[in-house]
Amino acid sequence: MILNAALRVFSQTGFAEAKMDQVAAAADLSKAALYLYFPSKDALLQSLLQQYSLLPELPGMVASLRDTPPTLGIPTLIAEAWRRLRERKELARVIVREIQSNPERAKLFSEQVGLPAYQSVAGYLDHWMKRGLLRHQDALVAAQCLLGMLWFFLLTQELMGGKELHPLSDDTIVATVARMFLDGAAIDKKRSQPRTGSGCGRPQGA
């Protein structure tokens, strides 16, 4: 498949350095045949992003968890998202190189990959904010924080050599991200209860 071949070539050599001849050879096609499908290398990259979004399953995952309370739903979502991100680390490597070197491709990534993912998670968070189990805040920003922690671990552990310097298990990463997010986002029902005492609920001496 052409896109699989392109992913391998771009991951190994970098998008800027890769030649269409290399992609054609990896796909067992002539260069002329490759250009029938993709008129340019940029068109190939755009199709690659559309076909192999880092988390194309995310909307479905979020929908399946809509009625699952955050204390269970968020860890489940994080575990699934992390597993799939790790499986697609080669695509992430290509994306990182391109968003750093080309502002237009960075915008393309944000539009086609980042924003749809954030919006899916934001819908779930907003649902539980309205039901009183998560703090009221900008749901889209909160979603970016949640997925941003996973993206950071993907970069540091899988793409920047962190696994060799300070290896972390998948369980540790998932549990840490879930705990840190929920500690900041979840409403503590005990602490949110009004304190009783003299003076219409004010603490004594207030």
Image: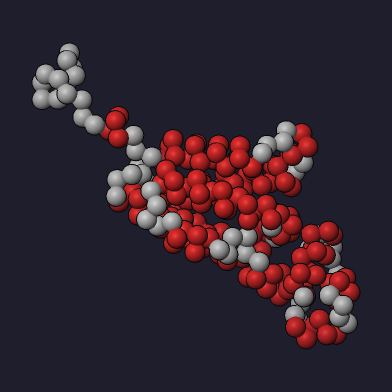
**Residue 141 visible, this orientation:** no
x and y, in percent, of residue 187 in the image: 34, 38
x and y, in percent, of residue 175 in the image: 55, 38
Horizontal side of 97 relative to 129 (left or right) equals right
Quadrant of residue 30 within the rendered picture = bottom right
Horizontal side of 25 relative to 199 (left or right) equals right
Residue furthest top as drawn: 205
Residue furthest left as drawn: 199
**Residue 168 visible, this orientation:** yes
What colour-coding does the image apply? secondary structure
Quadrant of residue 45 within the rendered picture = bottom right
**In which quadrant of the rendered image does the C terminus lie?**
top left
- 139 versus 61 height, above or below: above
Identify the residue shown where x is 58% and y is 64%: 56
* Residue nearest the viewer, comparing 17 with 61: 61
x and y, in percent, of residue 148 in the image: 56, 47
Identify the residue shown where x is 38% and y is 40%: 186
- 178 versus 101 height, above or below: above
Horizontal side of 116 relative to 22 (left or right) equals left
**In which quadrant of the rendered image does the N terminus lie?**
bottom right
x and y, in percent, of residue 24 in the image: 85, 76
Identify the residue shown where x is 79% and y is 59%: 11
Identify the residue shown where x is 11% and y is 18%: 198
- Please give the count of numbered marks on the rendered protein: 0
* Residue nearest the viewer, comparing 143 with 177: 177
